[in-house]
Image (spheres, helix red, strand yellow):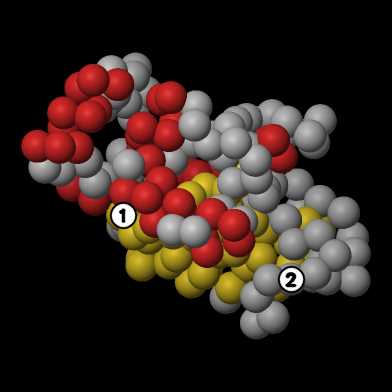
Amino acid sequence: MRLDLGCGFRRRDPQASGVDVVATPATDIVCDLSRYPWPFHDNSVEHFSCYHVIEHIPDIVGFMREVHRVGKRGAILEGEVPHFLSTYAYTDPTHIHFLGLRAFDMFCVPKTVTRQQGMVRKGINRLLGVHYGFGTFHAGGLFHKRVVCLRLPGLYRYTGQSWLINQFPEAYEVQGLLRGPGNVYFELEVRK
C-alpha cells in the first residue's frame, strides 16, 4: 500500500491512496493525521508521500512513530516542509512548526546522520558555532536517513547557488543567509 498523506486536492503519487482530514476528489481515506492510531494495519505501507504536512501536525514525534508503526521495513517517507528561513514558512497561519535541515536527525540511526566532514567544513562549523546533538529527547533508530537537502527555486539552481548552499547548509542556517522560498526535501527509510 502507498499513502499520500495530506493529499489535498491532488495526489502527488497517482498509485497512492489519498489521505486527508477533508474529503476532496483526491481523498480516498478521510483521517486526521494528528490523532493516533491511524486506521492502518501495522507494517502495511511501503511508501509515504508527505508534502507540506508535517509543519501542520501538533505532535511531530507521535506522527513519526505512527509512520514507523504502519510502515513496512524499508518503507520510504518522502516529502517537503518549508525551511524556517523561507518566507513561505510564515505566510500560512496554520503552520505550527518551523523546521530546518536537521529536524529529522533525532528520528534517525546516528550512523546515517551525516556530519560535515573535512577540515574546511569542521573549521567553518566551529567558527559558526554549529554543534551537533539531540537535546533531551531522542527517538533514534526509527529511520535511516537517505536524503535531506534544500530545494530552492530556479534562480538558485540556474546560478549554481543551490549546489553551494547544499554543500554548506549549516552556514546558511546559522547565518540566516537564505532568503525567499526554500523547502527542506527529505527521504527517510523505515528501520525495523
Q: How many marks?
A: 2
Q: Which residue position holds label 2?
A: 11
Task: Tell me the SS state at disc 2.
Answer: loop
- The quadrant in which the C terminus is found is bottom left
Q: Which amino acid does the dot numbered 2 rest on? A: Arg
Crowding around mark 2 (Cα neighbors within 10 Å: few <14, some 14 to 19, many 20+) is: many
Across and down, in percent, residue 151 comes to: 53, 55
**Residue at the (69%, 80%) spot, across then down:** 14
Q: Which amino acid does the dot numbered 1 rest on? A: His
**Residue at the (58%, 48%) spot, across then down:** 183
User: Which of 91 and 112 lies nearest the eye of the viewer?
Assistant: 91
Q: Quadrant of residue 6?
A: bottom right
| Residue 57 seen by the camera | no
Query: Does 78 sit left or right of 57 as displayed?
Result: left
- Marked residue nearer the N-terminal end (1 or 2): 2
Q: Compared to 47, does 52 lie above or below?
A: above
User: Which of 39 and 33 lies nearest the eye of the viewer?
Assistant: 33
- Mark 1 vs mark 2, CA separation in Å: 25 Å
Task: Tell me the SS state at disc 1.
Answer: strand
Q: In which quarter of the image is residue 116?
A: top left
**Residue at the (59%, 46%) spot, across then down:** 182
Name the mark on residue 144.
Answer: 1
Query: Does 85 sit left or right of 8 as displayed?
Result: left
